Image (cartoon, rainbow, N blue to C red):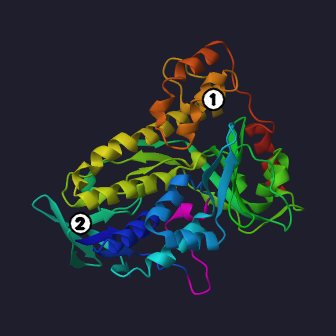
Amino acid sequence: MRIGIIGTGPAGLFLGATLARRGHAVLAVDRDTGPDPDGTWARRGVMQFHHPHGVRPQVGEGLLAELPEAHAAWVAAGAEPIVFVLPDGRRMTGGMRSRRATFERALRDVATREPGLEIRRGHVDGVAVSGGRARGLVVDGVGEPVDLVVDASGRSGRATRDLTGGPAVEGDTGAAYVSRQYRLHDPADPGPMTNPLAWQADLDGYQVIVFRHEAGVFSVLLVRPAGSLRELRHEAVFDAACRAIPGLDAWTDPGRAVPITPVLPGGRLYNHYRSQPDVDGLVLVGDAVCTTTPMFGRGLATTMMQCRELLRRIDTGEIGGFGAWCDAEMRPWVEDHVRSDDHARRAWAGGDVDLTGPLPSPLIMAAAEVDGRIGAALGPYLAMLAGPASLDTVEPLAHAVYAGGWRPAPAAGPTREELATLLRRTAAS
C-alpha cells in the first residue's frame, strides 16, 4: 500500500519505518524539522518532549522486535536497562532509563535511513474523503493520494478532528506541573529511590517524582493543583522548594548534581480517549487515541502497544478490528487515570476517601501496606501486563482497610500551604 502518516513523533517514526520495511511506500508529514545542525532539538509544539518520561518494557521490546538497529542506537546513546530482583530471586527488566529526546533521536536516526519512508516537512491541512473512505492527505494545499491514512499527530492534532467527533473520555485533572533536568557529578551516586523507575513523594497537597534517565541525568517533576505554587517556574524558587522537601534535597544537593536545563513549566494535564473514526482507511494511533497524566509514566508504553497491534492487523488484513481492540485495551487505562486523578484532586482539597464506589488504583496499591494479600496482585498491573480490571479481585480487601479507618500518611515535608509561604518569600527576595 501507499500509506500516509500524520506526525513524526514516536508513533509516526516507528510505524513509518516498520511499514516501509514491510514493503509499503510511506509518506510521513510533520512541521518539525528534526534536530538542528548544532544538535539542539526544540520540538516546538510538543510540550512533553523535554519533560520526564517513564520508559516501560513495552518500548524496548517493540524496538527489539521490529527495529533492533534503533534499540542498539538508543543503548549506544546511553539508555540504560532497569533491572530489579523479584522476591523469589529472579531478575526482571523493568524498562529503560532514558530521556524522551534520547529515545526519539535514536529512532529518528534509523527511520530517516529506511528505504521506502519519505519524511516530509509540511502541514497536513486535512484528509480527503469520498464514499466513506479516506483517499489521501492534503499537504500544504496539495493532494497526496494514499491507500491508508494513519493519524499519529497527538491529542491536539486537527487534521482529522472533523472526522472523529469528540473524545469518548476526557478529563481535566485540575493539575499542572513543572520539571527540571539535572546531571549527577561524576562519580556521585543517585539519590534515594522508592521503586525501580523513580523516587516519589506524595506530600500534603502536591506530589514530587524524580525520574532517572541515562548517563547520570535525572528529572525532577513537581505536580500541583493548577493555579497554586505558580512561583515554581522561577529558578531560585524551584531551588528553594528542592531544598525544603526531604529526599528531594538529597537528589538536588549541589554537591551531588547540577541543573542542565532551566525550569520547564508544563500546562494543565488532561486524560483523553478518542474512539476510532467511522471512516474506512483512516486510523488513529498513539496520543491521538489516548493520553494520560505522567505520574505513572504510561504514555510511551500505550503508544508502542497500539503500534504493534496496528502492525499485526495491517499484516493480517484485520485493520477494521483495531477500534474494538483500542476500546478494550486502551480506554481502561484512561478511565483508570480519570478515577485516580479525581481522587488526587479531592485529597489535595482536603477531602476524605470516597467509599461509596470502587476505589481508584492508587488507594488499592497504598492499602497493600496494611493487607499483604493486595500486594501479591499488583505486579502484572504495575508492569501493564494486565489492565486495571486485574485489581478488581483485591479492591474489596482495600475497601475494608479504608472502611476500618486507615489512611495513607503524606510523605514527610512541607504542606502545600507551608511550601507556598516559603516560595512567596523566596520570590519576594
Residue 232 locus on image (x, y percent): 72, 54
x, y percent for residue 86? 67, 41
**Image coordinates for residue 266, horizontal then vertical, percent:** 59, 56
Residues shaded magenta: 36-51
**Looking at the image, which residue is at 67% across and 52% down?**
83
Question: Which image quarter is the C terminus in?
Answer: bottom right
Q: Amino acid at mark 1?
A: Gly
Main secondary structure type of the part rendered in magenta:
loop
Residue 144 appears in which quarter of the rendering? bottom left
Badge 2 is on which residue?
A: 148
Residue 410 seen from this side: yes
Q: Which residue is mark 1?
A: 375
| Residue nearest the observer in this picture, 162 or 339 | 339
Between disc 1 and disc 2, the foreground one is: 1
Q: Position of residue 212 (x, y in %)?
A: 70, 57
Residue ranking furthest to the left: 131
Q: Is residue 155 visible?
A: no
Using a 10 Å C-alpha cutoff, classify the residue at mark 2 as few (fewer than 14 neighbours), some (14 to 19) or many (20 or more).
many
Amino acid type, mark 2: Leu
Q: Is residue 47 magenta?
A: yes
Q: Residue at x 54, y 68 (%)?
A: 71
Q: Counting residues from the N terminus, which is met first, the one under dot 1 or under dot 2?
A: 2
In the picture, which quadrant includes the N terminus?
Answer: bottom left
Left or right of residue 417, residue 326 in this image: left
Which residue lies most toward the front here? 89
Q: Is residue 252 left or right of residue 305?
A: right
